[in-house]
Image (spheres, rainbow, N blue to C red):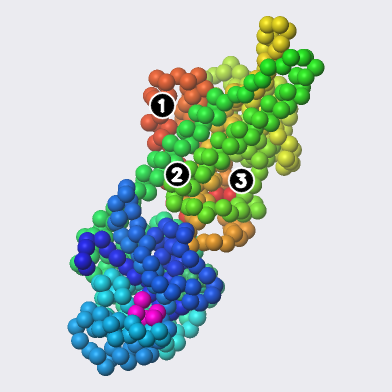
Amino acid sequence: MKERIPAFAVIGHPNEGKSSIVSTLAEDDSVRISPIPGETRRCREYPVTVDGREVIRFIDTPGFQQPRATLQWMIDNPGPEMEMLADFITDHRPDHDFFDECELLSPLADGAGIIFVVDGSRPVRSVDKIEMEILRLTGLPRMAVINTKEKNRAEFLDDWKSEARKHFNTIRLFDAKRATYAERIDLLESLKGIDPDWQPALVEVIDAFKNDWDQRLIDTSTILMDLLAQASRYAVKKTCPDEALIPEIKKTLQETYRTDIDRLENAAHKNIRKRFKHNIFNYEFPPTSILNEDLFSKKSWRVLGLRQWQLVAAGGAGGGAVGAKIDLVTGGQSLGLFAAIGGLIGAGSALLGLQQAARSKVKGLPLGRMEIQVGPVKNEQLNYVLTNRVLIYFSHVINWAHSRRDTPEAAPSSRNSITANFTSQWSATQKKLFTKFFKALQKEDGIKISMLKPQVTALLIDTLKSISLLKQPLE
Ligand SMILES: Nc1nc2c(ncn2[C@@H]2O[C@H](COP(=O)(O)OP(=O)(O)OP(=O)(O)O)[C@@H](O)[C@H]2O)c(=O)[nH]1
Ligand SMILES: [Mg+2]
């Protein structure tokens, strides 16, 4: 290699998923992927940068068009491998029929490693063996990646494995469309094994990836805490010249309050998605996902808020405080809320959360005018609902391979066992910590906020890590 940055060319037959693998590994959703074979006609490099520094590079290439003639030429022109590749390209550049071969072999002539992609859901053909043999003759470090496009077709896998073993240093199964962060790291780990000379550089790459991932979790927790700080203090006001207009103005203000909090939430979600390098992540959540519900809907609050016993636990200090807490939460509508919490009221689009979250008050002003204010929130349910929604959003973002361009399928029923209310798994102590933090945010108590922040950050990062380990989105 000319430089220390490891470079891997992703090579294969047309339409096997080369560009999809590049997109997923490089976390680049701008890579062109298409069901029509021959989409990629030119090599293109996709550098992966961490902290502005390029650590590894993947090269997307066109598929083989003339494998038989290429192999024959190689057999007829043996020689030192690098010279052979350079000579092949010089000889064939003027011939349009070999345009794709010249393109795909040029990164190899520059010494790139090879990631050979095959679709394991179809049988091995003679042309595949020819392509594998061409790559073996390059003498470059190489790995075969079996990307099974049709998931339920495993009958050819053994054939692929035994054929690939003859030509490659390492073989991996990898799902370009569903690979998680951990699976991407696993693939890099196995790349280490393809050539001892590359091992130190790849160890550095893996370290850089892991540190970068940890930093993304820290950033996600910061984005969430900023959202909670903004939402917990947010209020809208308007002066009202006439008492008769109060109900109408209050209604408008409530609507403004609601859309403004929605906007804050959307901005936080967008920041998280950007942090995970998703630019075209504009997809529908699975139909069963609670994220399809309005932030202030009854259902969101019922599913994502604290349960009654959890409120009691989080309230903590003795009976009096518990009573006060329930009062605060119910805001005078105890029956309604607790019926909703208990799940007695079915899912509906009524904005229960809004009334619970934002207090409205009317203040007299001179000259008979009044000021109406909606917010700030008094109810820590909003904190939990926003937090759980960020956690669900995060779980979708991290499990969305960058090569996916379609909409999600409905989740299989086994997945429903994972609760969307992830914070319900926090211990009573952790909930108390979160409650204290919420109160400090509301009071804008800087000293308390900075005192609690390290513990809250640690709690959030632990939570984000557990969600990453699930390897599937929360509903
Ligand atoms: N279901 C499924 N489809 C896949 C998978 N990998 C790739 N595809 C689809 O297969 C088609 C080809 O994928 P690409 O990544 O463009 O393949 P390619 O090898 O780069 O193709 P060319 O550039 O034409 O040589 C696209 O429609 C992809 O969405 C997979 O793991 N599962
Ligand atoms: Mg392609």
In this view of the protein, which residue sits in the foreground, 93 or 117? 93
Residue type for callout 3: Leu
Say left or right for 410 vs 465. right
Q: What residue would you read off at disc 2?
A: 464
Residue type for callout 2: Leu
Q: Does the image show residue 132?
A: no
Q: Which dot marks residue 452?
A: 1
- Dot 3 crowding, Cα within 10 Å, few <14, some 14–19, many 20+: many
Q: Which residues are magenta?
A: 99-104
Q: Separation of disc 3 and disc 2 at Cα?
A: 17 Å
Query: Which circle's residue, 3 or 2, is located before the other in the chain?
Result: 3
The percent coordinates of residue 386 (x first, y second) are 56, 36
Query: Which circle's residue, 2 or 1, is located before the other in the chain?
Result: 1
Q: Which dot marks residue 291?
A: 3
Q: Separation of disc 2 and disc 1 at Cα?
A: 18 Å
* Mark 2, secondary structure of its residue: helix
Could you tell me if the residues under marks 1 and 3 are in contact, i.e. CB atoms within 8 Å? no
Query: Which circle's residue, 1 or 3, is located before the other in the chain?
Result: 3
In this view of the protein, which residue sits in the foreground, 205 or 330? 205
The percent coordinates of residue 233 (x first, y second) are 54, 24
Residue type for callout 1: Leu
Which residue is drawn at the image coordinates 53% and 37% (left, top)? 387
Which residue is drawn at the image coordinates 59% and 59% (left, top)? 407
* Mark 1, secondary structure of its residue: helix
The percent coordinates of residue 144 (x first, y second) are 36, 74
